[in-house]
Image (tube, rainbow, N blue to C red):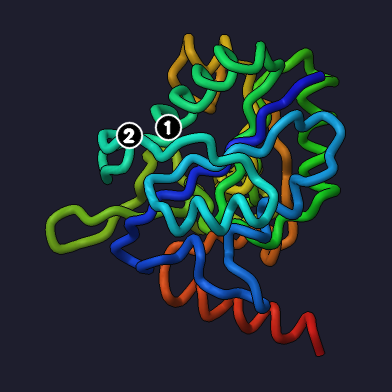
């Protein structure tokens, strides 16, 4: 099985400037993701898509392939992860042959474990190349959510679970951003990483599921690394 691992790393970030190469545990943030993907037999290439020359240089030094800088139209706030993934996938398959799956690994999830990536790849194979999505248990259950209506709050859902014990509610999940694996033809057809039959890769560890998007997230990540080293 041939899987292309893609790490999207845009240079611009409004909420946390320079986040993809900020230092964490003595190395740039993006290095964590490159290192966890290295040496996994099914991964035929680790490709970084970036519009930033500094990120490109750091990624190459860490062992990733950066064959080009991302086109300007894919470096805006409006460009989606799917657009970026399809651009990289089309280039790679034209240059180096077809792959069975595209694995999107965001650099803002530094604590995902190699074992988790391998478990996701195994699920992809076991379920006949159905999409696999990294998810965590939703801490705010959908059936307990409220919405504002005028000056008041009312249940978000008509058939809500307010007043019920949370243990009795059906399990719900949220995508945590750490793992997306999909067959190329399904990504091209549906233009989404969420297919009709998506297999959950459940990640119970809050540390592993952390997605660094704000300064608060970054501070938390530094605390976790410091505690790990004690």
Q: How many marks?
A: 2
User: Going by the picture, which residue comes out furthest to the bottom?
Assistant: 230
Task: Give left or right: position of 208 versus 87.
Answer: right
- Corner quadrant of residue 75: top left
Measured from the top left, where is residue 128 in percent x and y?
78, 13
Mark 2 element type: loop
- Evaluate whether residue 196 shows in this view: no
The circle drawn on residue 84 is 1
Please report the residue visible at 19 percent of the width from the left and 53 percent of the height from the top. Answer: 149
Compared with residue 85, is residue 20 higher up or lower down, i.e. above or below?
A: below
Please report the residue visible at 55 percent of the width from the left and 12 percent of the height from the top. Answer: 94
Compared with residue 94, is residue 221 higher up or lower down, i.e. above or below?
A: below
Measured from the top left, where is residue 109 in percent x and y?
60, 57
**Residue situated in front as seen by the camera: 46 or 144:** 46
Mark 1 element type: helix
Please report the residue visible at 56 percent of the width from the left and 43 percent of the height from the top. Answer: 7
**Residue situated in front as seen by the camera: 217 or 55:** 55
Measured from the top left, where is residue 53 in percent x and y?
42, 53
Q: Earlier in the sequence, mark 1 or mark 2?
A: 2
Label 2 environment density (alpha carbons within 10 Å; few <14, some 14–19, many ≥20) = few
Quadrant where the C terminus sits is bottom right
- Look at mark 2 in the image and give the residue it sits on: 71
Label 1 environment density (alpha carbons within 10 Å; few <14, some 14–19, many ≥20) = many
Measured from the top left, where is residue 191 in percent x and y?
43, 19
Quadrant where the N terminus sits is top right
């Amino acid at each position: 099985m041939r899987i292309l691992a893609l790490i999207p790393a845009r240079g611009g970030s409004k909420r946390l400037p320079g986040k993809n190469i900020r230092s964490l545990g003595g190395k740039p943030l993006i290095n964590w993701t490159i290192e966890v993907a290295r040496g996994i037999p099914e991964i035929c290439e680790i490709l970084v898509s970036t519009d930033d020359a500094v990120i490109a240089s750091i990624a190459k030094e860490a062992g990733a392939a950066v064959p080009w800088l991302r086109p300007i139209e894919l470096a805006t706030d409006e460009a989606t992860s799917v657009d970026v993934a399809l651009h990289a996938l089309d280039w790679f398959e034209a240059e180096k042959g077809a792959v069975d799956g595209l694995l999107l690994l965001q650099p803002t999830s530094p604590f995902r474990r190699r074992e988790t990536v391998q478990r996701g790849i195994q699920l992809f194979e076991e379920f006949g190349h159905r999409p696999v999505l990294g998810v965590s248990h939703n801490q705010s259950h959908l059936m307990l959510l409220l919405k504002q209506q005028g000056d008041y709050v009312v249940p978000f859902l008509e058939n809500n679970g307010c007043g019920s014990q949370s243990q009795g509610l059906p399990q719900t999940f949220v995508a945590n951003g750490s793992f997306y694996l999909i067959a190329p033809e399904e990504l091209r057809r549906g233009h989404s990483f969420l297919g009709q039959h998506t297999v959950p890769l459940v990640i119970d560890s809050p540390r592993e599921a952390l997605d660094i998007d704000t300064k608060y997230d970054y501070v938390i990540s530094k605390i976790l690394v410091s505690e790990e080293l004690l």
